[in-house]
Image: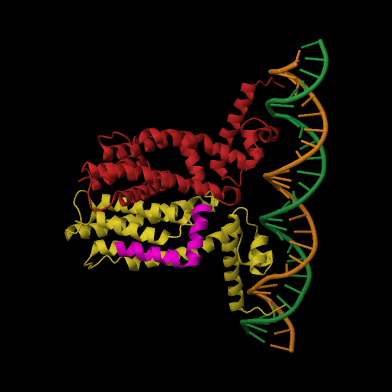
Chain colours: A yellow, B red, C green, D orange
Amino acid sequence: MVKKTKEDAEKTRESIIDAARTVFLQRGVSRSSLEQIASKAGVTRGAVYWHFQNKTELMLALRERVFLPLIDQMEDTISLEENLDPLGSIEEFMCSRFEHLESCQETRETYEIMMTKCEYVDEFANVLQQITSNCSIIEDKLTTCYEQAQAKGQVTIKMTARELAMDSNLFWIGLLHLWIKDANGLNAKKYAMDAIKNHIKLRRK
Amino acid sequence: MVKKTKEDAEKTRESIIDAARTVFLQRGVSRSSLEQIASKAGVTRGAVYWHFQNKTELMLALRERVFLPLIDQMEDTISLEENLDPLGSIEEFMCSRFEHLESCQETRETYEIMMTKCEYVDEFANVLQQITSNCSIIEDKLTTCYEQAQAKGQVTIKMTARELAMDSNLFWIGLLHLWIKDANGLNAKKYAMDAIKNHIKLRRK
DNA sequence: TTATATACAAACATGAATGTATGTAAAGAG
DNA sequence: CTCTTTACATACATTCATGTTTGTATATAA
């Protein structure tokens, strides 16, 4: 038996989460047993039950480790005040966030698990609400940006800022889903970047 | 023991599928046991195993009953030849299909199961491929429509037909996902219809 | 009319995952 | 230097879903 200091315990906890992500990705959340996760992390189920109440809590922890930083990051990327180029900042927001999703393996895998390897029932039902809630936050931010863009005459006035934001929001949701599902798409990144640029170009006056 | 003629057996099969849809929706695919499905259908697991190899086959049958007609329907809705108003036909396609999704309970529930109550691993992994394949078919159809629209001068020439189609395709994917997840949205239908009209309006010259 | 295939129900066997309870060595507190 | 708590490993009990096998009543074909 090895020594276990507090930092060691924290490492164990992290390694369990990492193992869970790998196993969830391979086998789906519900088919993954805690035994499989534990052994992949080099521990026993005892350790898993020590750090997490059950598989659900483990899954939520796995999710939060990626999504909590993302929410913060969103605050930074779309700066709402004193925006010289609102339309450009929307494009910048989408591109940079996509870049991060693409390059950060943990984030990418977590998205894939949550979008295609997880069933939203019972304890997970309210996670769906959080997701839609996040979507409407994004829509609000986009609306503000488009208002600024309209005030600066950057953008077509065929539609209201809210309507433009809705359309962009749906575009963004679709992009993420298609990207996650189209794993083998070698040129997925270029596809996405072009899609974003064209999406913005279409509304620039 | 009641008589069972061939038609009776077919009815049993259908009722099992219906029961499966209900149970899948409530409990998610993996947590649904064949026992629960059978008893909801008023039969035993024997009947389920008689009609389907296992839960996976049952799930695929459930899916096909909705998706096979949808594929046919798609051929009709977007008529590619002799299109007087290509842009309008795209709008019409989206609106009518959404109307169907909204009004047909079986279709709606099946979509919900496939989008939020199912894990795409192992035997289901290739279903994802089918989905993305369908998406690219839609993108192709949209491209053709936009080409016609451009030929008629209906649409802005900022982007190529393919680029417009990509954007519309992503919009459509996003709309479906947001709609399914936002079950409580009372005005979801109006939201969607407005979103579609605005989406088209934005590209009309 | 009899034989066979159909359409299930019922019983059986198995295995796997879960949660909990107990054991234990080391860390940390006093 | 003890005592308690931490951080697990191990063992146990239980549940439960699955797949298969067997039984059986009826439909259907010859």
Residue B42 image offset from top left, x and y in percent: 64, 30
**Residue at position x 56%, y 41% in the image:** B24
Which residue corresponds to the image point at 31% horizontal and 56% vertical from the top-left? Answer: A140
Residue B117 visible to the viewer: no
Count of labels in the image = 0
> From what the image shows, is residue B70 above or below residue B137?
above
Q: Residue at x 39, y 56 (%)?
A: A134
Which of the 4 image quadrants contains residue A47? bottom right
Q: Residue at x 59, y 74 (%)?
A: A11
Q: Is residue C14 left or right of residue A24?
A: right
In x, y percent, where is residue A201?
25, 57
Asked if residue B77 can be seen in this view, the reply is yes
Horizontal side of residue B52 vs A165, given as left or right: right
Question: What x and y, as percent, mark residue A77?
Answer: 33, 67
Is B134 located above or below residue A124 in the figure? above
Of the 4 image quadrants, the one containing the N terminus of chain B is top right
**Which secondary structure type mostly characterizes the magenta part of the structure?**
helix
Q: Is residue A96 magenta?
A: yes
Which residue is more in the foreground, B161 or B20? B161
Task: Tell me residue B6's x, y (percent).
Answer: 64, 22
Q: Nearer the viewer, residue A127 or B10?
A: B10
Picture quadrant of residue D22: top right
Residue A113 falls inside the magenta stretch: yes
Residue B110 appears left or right of A4: left
Magenta-drawn segment: A91-116
